[in-house]
Image (tube, rainbow, N blue to C red):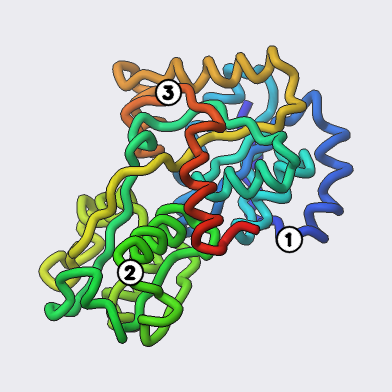
């Protein structure tokens, strides 16, 4: 059975509230999935399609992937149980856990997410270090992005650079690919983003590395995960976890899904892994 891939993203709490009745009324027959919009809707849908088909087969029910309009909507969707499964960055998971009163449960992460990194890029030859960003225009991704904002900001603060005081202008592109585009087009002097999106752009020849280069790579931190609500029945949670852990690159299906997810394999994770992200968010004043 092939799932339905909605092209209409949730547009905030009002739309989510209207969607809630349908979500609960089909709880036993439709499994709903969403993801933070850290890349273009087209790319997110492309990455999701084979995984949704695989989950349909393993869960034995229709699986729907519905995009959201922004990061906040993904947090509300899980907190209000309007989706069953959400792909979060570390910071979005922390926000969802706080918003749901500790009811967000991270099941699995990619092996790469144990030591995820961000990169700072520029097309200005004069920018060689973080200190060179003073009095420059710099773009982050979404304000709620772990690798596109929170952790880059955290490492800047550790280097005694306050973006709000030391940069000429702070911009938010909304997504990692949009940050690359902004730097390449000269709209900003530099940008910070997810290393895996950068590496994918380089591998696909979508960025001219003779003009746009990485000048700083952050230390590693825990990042992305697949999260469910604590009210999900234990048996379904176990089945879902097993489905992810069973993905193997030695099979054609597993290779397709893992390659699209930019993963070597999925491994178990737990909420305590994201305590460092929570602390960084509170220190940066991004989580009250």
Q: Is residue 211 above or below residue 66?
A: below
Q: Is residue 51 above or below residue 237?
A: below
Q: Residue at x 49, y 57 (%)?
A: 145
Question: Which residue carries the number 3 mark?
Answer: 267
- Could you say where residue 11 lies in the image, as x and y percent from the top left? 71, 62
Of residue 168 and residue 1, the one placed in the foreground of this image is: 168
Q: Is residue 9 above or below residue 224?
A: below
Of residue 135 and residue 3, the one placed in the foreground of this image is: 135
Q: Which residue is outermost to the top?
A: 235
**Mark 1, mark 2: which one is toward the viewer?**
2
The local crowd at label 2, few if under 14, some if 14 to 19, many if 20 or more residues have their Cα within 10 Å, is few
The local crowd at label 3, few if under 14, some if 14 to 19, many if 20 or more residues have their Cα within 10 Å, is some
The residues bearing labels 1 and 3 have C-alpha atoms spaced at a distance of 31 Å
- Could you say where residue 48 lies in the image, as x and y percent from the top left? 51, 40
Q: Earlier in the sequence, mark 1 or mark 2?
A: 1
Q: Residue at x 66, y 17 (%)?
A: 60
Left or right relative to 206: residue 29: right
Of residue 32 and residue 89, the one placed in the foreground of this image is: 89
The residues bearing labels 1 and 2 have C-alpha atoms spaced at a distance of 36 Å
Q: Earlier in the sequence, mark 3 or mark 2?
A: 2
Q: Residue at x 28, y 48 (%)?
A: 219
Q: Is residue 103 above or below residue 163?
A: above
Q: Is residue 224 visible?
A: yes
The residues bearing labels 3 and 2 have C-alpha atoms spaced at a distance of 35 Å
Q: Is residue 53 visible?
A: no
Name the secondary structure under disc 3.
Answer: strand
**Mark 1, mark 3: which one is toward the viewer?**
3
Question: Which residue carries the number 1 mark?
Answer: 12
Residue 160 has which mark? 2
């Amino acid at each position: 059975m092939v799932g339905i891939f909605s092209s209409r993203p949730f547009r905030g709490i009002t739309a989510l509230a209207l969607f809630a009745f349908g979500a609960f009324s089909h709880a036993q027959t439709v499994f709903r999935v969403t993801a933070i919009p850290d890349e273009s809707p087209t790319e997110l849908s492309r990455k999701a399609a084979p995984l949704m088909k695989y989950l349909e087969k393993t869960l034995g029910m229709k699986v729907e992937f519905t995009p959201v309009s922004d990061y906040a909507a993904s947090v509300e969707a899980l907190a209000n149980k309007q989706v069953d499964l959400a792909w979060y960055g570390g910071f979005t998971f922390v926000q969802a856990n706080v918003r749901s009163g500790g009811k967000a449960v991270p099941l699995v992460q990619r092996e790469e997410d144990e030591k995820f990194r961000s990169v700072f890029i520029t097309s200005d030859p004069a920018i060689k270090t973080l200190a060179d960003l003073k009095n420059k225009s710099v773009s982050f991704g979404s304000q709620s992005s772990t690798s596109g904002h929170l952790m880059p900001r955290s490492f800047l603060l550790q280097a005694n650079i306050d973006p709000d005081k030391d940069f000429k202008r702070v911009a938010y592109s909304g997504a990692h690919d949009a940050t690359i585009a902004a730097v390449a087009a000269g709209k900003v002097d530099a940008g910070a983003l997810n290393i895996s999106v950068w590496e994918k752009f380089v591998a696909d020849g979508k960025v001219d590395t003779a003009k746009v280069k990485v000048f700083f790579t952050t230390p590693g931190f825990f990042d992305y995960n697949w999260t469910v609500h604590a009210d999900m029945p234990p048996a379904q949670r176990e089945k879902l976890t097993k489905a992810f852990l069973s993905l193997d690159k030695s099979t054609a299906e597993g290779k397709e899904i893992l390659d699209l997810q930019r993963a070597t394999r999925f491994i178990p994770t737990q909420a305590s892994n994201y305590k460092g992200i929570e602390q960084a968010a509170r220190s940066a004043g991004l989580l009250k």
